[in-house]
Image (cartoon, rainbow, N blue to C red):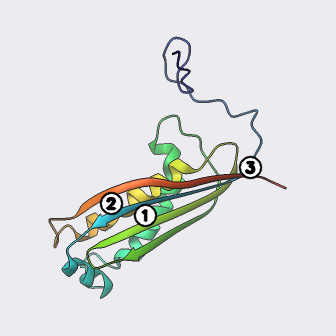
Amino acid sequence: MEKNFTHLDNEGNAKMVNVGNKPIQKRIARAKGTIYLNSFTIEKIKSLEIKKGDVFTVAKIAGIQAAKQTANLIPLCHTLTINYVDVDFKVFESQIDVEVTVECDAKTGAEMEALTAVSVTLLTIYDMCKAIDKDMKISNIHLLEKIKKDVL
């Protein structure tokens, strides 16, 4: 079975996919990931007692920035003009779930931006809490959905 890879030319060299002839569409991508922490750490985060500052605010800003910088981090990824990024936290006894939604009007999808934003949000939580929690674990980063709709 012959495979046609979109990011390889006929000689097997890396190439960026040409999306020039594709129509601009409304693109929405949602991604999710989890960080497991000690319940003690969760309480410190909720009561704003982490020495580095407000974990949720800093992590949210980091996630938004990451979505906007994805093309600088992922080779061959197209630069997108992002309309909206939402970073949402669900806090449990020993874990925090992060869900990111990215919306843009573009010729290619925003799933890499959503996945990058989730990853950097989780890494920021890890960084801010590493002094008090040596057992943290980041897990299950995945795409929930991607949508494309015609722009009217």
Within 10 Å of the Cα at label 2, are there few (<14), some (14-19), or many (20+) other Cα atoms? some
- Residue for point 54% across, 24% down: 5
Q: Label 2 to label 3, Cα distance in Å? A: 31 Å
Left or right of 27, for residue 97: left
Q: Earlier in the sequence, mark 2 or mark 1?
A: 1
Residue at mark 2: 123
Residue at x 27%, y 64% (from the top left corner): 127
Q: Position of residue 66 (x, y in %)?
A: 47, 56
Q: Is residue 108 above or below residue 144?
A: above
Residue type at numbered disc 3: Gln
Give above or below for 94 relative to 20.
below
Amino acid of disc 1: Ala
Residue annotated with mark 3: 25
Residue pictured at 53% horizontal, 15% vertical:
2
Direction from residue 24 to residue 48 in the image, left or right: left
Q: Is residue 51 above or below residue 146?
A: below
- Residue 81 at what x, y percent from top left? 65, 52
Residue, far front: 1
**Of labels 3 and 1, the one closer to you:** 3
Q: Residue at x 43, y 53 (%)?
A: 142
Q: Which residue is mark 1?
A: 62
Q: Nearer the viewer, mark 2 or mark 3?
A: 3
The front one of 65 and 87 is: 87
Instruction: Specify the quadrant of the image occupied by residue 103.
Output: bottom right
